[in-house]
Amino acid sequence: MYHNEKRCIILRNSYELNIHNLKSYYEFSITGDLSGNHTFDLSLAKDLKTIIIQSHNDFHLSELVTLSVFKKNHKKCLYKLSFKIKNTNLVPEIIDDDYDHKMSSVPDYEIVVNNNPSPFNLFFQVNGPPQKPVNILNSDGDLLFSEFWPQKGFDWKVNHNNHLTYFHRNLSAWLVRDSLFQVVDSVFCLNGYNADNHDFIALENGHYLLFAYDDQVLNLSDSIPGGSSNAVVEGLIIQELDQDHNLLLEWRSWDHFSITDNVYLNLTSNDINLIHCNAIDLDIDNHILISSRHLDEITKINRNTGDVIWRWGGSQNQFEFINDYPFTYQHSIRALGDNKYLLYDNGNHSNLYNDGSNISRALIYQLDTINFIANQIWEFSHPDEFYAPSTGCVQMLPNNNVLISWGNLSSSNLGAIITEVDTANNNEIVFELRCSFGQNVYRAQKYDWFFDDSIVGCTEDSAINYSSNFIIPDNSCLYNELSCVEKDIPIFMPQGWSIVGYTCDNPIDLSIAFEDILESIIIVKNYLGAAYLPEFNFNGIGNLNFSNGYQIKLTNSIEDFQFCSIISTDYDSSDETQNCSIVDYELEIPLGWSLLGYYCEESQDIDNVFSEINDVVIIVKDYLGNAYIPEWNYNGIGSFEYSEGYQIKMEQNISGLNICPVFSISE
């Protein structure tokens, strides 16, 4: 039940098939009791065992679909499969537009312990601030790589195929990047599902394992006392794809889990987040492990048949905990071999066993799958007794150290904390990184991996050792000295009304600033309504001031106008440069309407310029009437451009906003 209208049907055989023989000797039919007979494509996946049947048209809501297989020249039905399409389509979530560029950004962290940890590099993404950079640190805690990719980077890690993988929120897909920084694949869920961002496996043979949440509208009034007749209930879909993105396996929680398996949620609610899967792994025998946070359960699933092998934890637990209390709201299940399993126990209900206090732990269990006994063989809780109600992960490193990301510690007024423990030396903490409050980390993991050396170097084009071949910065940039050059950047002003931004350091009288084009100027106005009318020799504004915007009306368009040259720090090989210094210029934007003149040499997306103050920006407009409205996640302007002016309306006064460096020539 509850299948999507867009879906293929797959049949798995126990031995390899021949597509020619399959089509020659067998006949297939697909019929919907509402949509009628379907035409379809029939093919074999690369494993030559999986038959893929893709209908040319979508199925209808609420209909029963039947697949029948006949042997040609015989009317006897050899195989029949029926399934029901869901009753209702939910409105999909609208996701913000993506950005193509990346910005420099670094996490705010401190290394408080560093005593011979594992020598590998540390991978993590910082969440919390407007910019959420992906980062790589070496074992000394030095930042090797940090970039902000809007909407991208969640669960940034090196996968089983030795490629970087991370989630793309806008696409609801996983991206795969090689050591040359090239995106070599993008992986989507099939059958109309949107991939979830919690976990993803990219295997050495090119196969992918990923999962999706599957919300369905169900009538629970008959099965749950007081249940809603229109409840939105979360299901889980697991898919395995081959290297050609053919579907090999689809596992559905609707066939195996019951709504009453969750003992915490109000099952009479209209919105039931039943499962919340947050991790997937392959056991040593290649069967699937999943962690279902809202069920307190680790489930092992047969990768060939989809049957549940065992359920561990939660209301349907099959194992006896002989020397430990049960984990709750756990993350990061990982198989270690010999029926040993590593996980991060958030411990949201550990207060039931700890005198009323919750505590988070890293744990290793060994399972006896004959007698169904769970034996805890290793445990670590932080000396500071951390409790993280959400996120977090744990990783076994090759030297048997354990790396722990403690999850969201904001309720304890702490930022993310990442700890490495020496399990062979009395659980000594050999490394600990602490981020500032407000910076959270979903997962942190270590790998013996960095980008190809040929693409690592100085990426700043103002440096003397810059090369366009370098795309990964390594802090190797060299400069002769901080020097300035003057750049002529002409301004275009159209006929009629427009808005111009004044970009010169020094204020100047309007009659002097516009002396070359006075005959074309009808009027200039500032945001207070004061006016300059050259025809009447009237100047009610006085001086043009740096970073202010001015409305201007012209009788004709003006090409190549320039108030002043811009001072830049570009390297000039002729050495005809001048020493310069950086001026910390901070914008002040008043409450209500005003006019802003954008003075930066490089254009910037408005979202990035205002990332720190978007909660108090009501609207920004350019002279053509295009608008930026952060409350609605709407950007009809795009980027701020040098010397352009913009109307802006604020909920409160803002001071101290620094949007780019300003350079001045030393006297």
Image: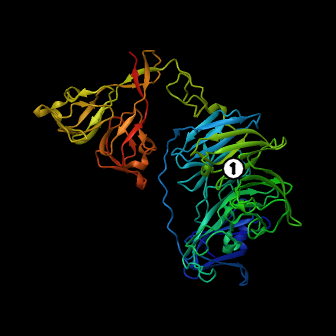
- Residue at image position (80%, 43%) is 427
- The residue under label 1 is 386
Residue 472 % position (x, y): 59, 34
Q: Is residue 340 visible?
A: no
- Residue at image position (86%, 66%) is 372
From the viewer's perspective, tell me whether residue 427 is left or right of residue 564: right
Residue 105 % position (x, y): 54, 38
Nearer to me, 140 or 256: 140
| Amino acid type assigned to the residue bearing label 1 in the image | Phe
Q: Quadrant of residue 416?
A: top right
From the viewer's perspective, tell me whether residue 432 is left or right of residue 481: right
Q: Quadrant of the C terminus?
A: top left
- Residue at image position (61%, 60%) is 189
Residue 484 % position (x, y): 43, 21
Is the residue 3 above or below the residue 183 in the image? below
Residue 244 % position (x, y): 66, 56
Q: Is residue 620 visible?
A: yes
The residue lying furthest to the right in this view is 371
